[in-house]
Amino acid sequence: MISAVAEMYEIHPQTLRLYEREGLLRPSRSDGNTRLYTDEDLERLEFILNLARDMGVNMAGIAIVLQMRERMEEMNRQMQGFVDFVRTEMLTRVNQAPQSPGLVPFKRPIRVVPKEPGSKR
């Protein structure tokens, strides 16, 4: 509830209402219209308070940082999905393809020796 969260983080309930009005926080509501804060909401609030209190970022800056953070998380999810797709596709093709006579497995591990600075190798 808003009063418990405000007390926990030593902020005024109006600050939480302002963050919600500005779209920085989106707590769910009970049937009686009471704000209900999830663990994710509290983590987001801690991030907002860190930006505001510790770094001096204003509301517009906080909104931009949160938006960029959400975009980066979405890009990360998309990249992970792409990596998973490529991995699955490669494993499927390797398992379906007949063994090529051009591919010979190594019988011993290959050791790569790093080039020493100043050497002409």
Image (spheres, rainbow, N blue to C red):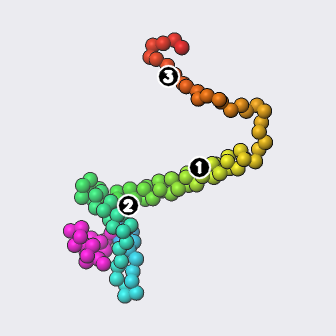
Label 2 vs label 1: CA separation? Answer: 30 Å
> Given the current orientation, which residue lies at the most extreme top position?
120
Mark 1 and mark 3 in contact? Answer it, CB < 8 Å.
Answer: no
Please give left or right for residue 90 compared with residue 110 in the image: right
Is residue 7 covered in magenta? yes
Kindly identify which residue carries mark 3.
114
Above or below, 108 against 38 in this view is above
User: Could you tell me which residue is drawn at 32 percent across and 60 percent down?
Assistant: 47
* Amino acid type for the residue under numbered disc 2: Ala
User: Could you tell me which residue is drawn at 76 percent across and 48 percent down?
Assistant: 96
Label 3 vs label 2: CA separation? Answer: 47 Å
Above or below, 1 against 69 in this view is below
Which mark, residue 83? Answer: 1
* Amino acid type for the residue under numbered disc 1: Val
Mark 3 and mark 2 in contact? Answer it, CB < 8 Å.
Answer: no
Residue range in magenta is 1-19
Kindly identify which residue carries mark 2.
63
Tell me, yes or no, if residue 22 can be seen here. Answer: no
User: Could you tell me which residue is drawn at 71 percent across and 44 percent down?
Assistant: 94
**In which quadrant will I find the C terminus?**
top right
Please give left or right for residue 77 compared with residue 5 in the image: right
Please, what secondary structure does the residue beneath circle 3 have? loop
Nearest to viewer (mark 1 / mark 3): 3
* Amino acid type for the residue under numbered disc 3: Pro
Above or below, 86 against 108 in this view is below
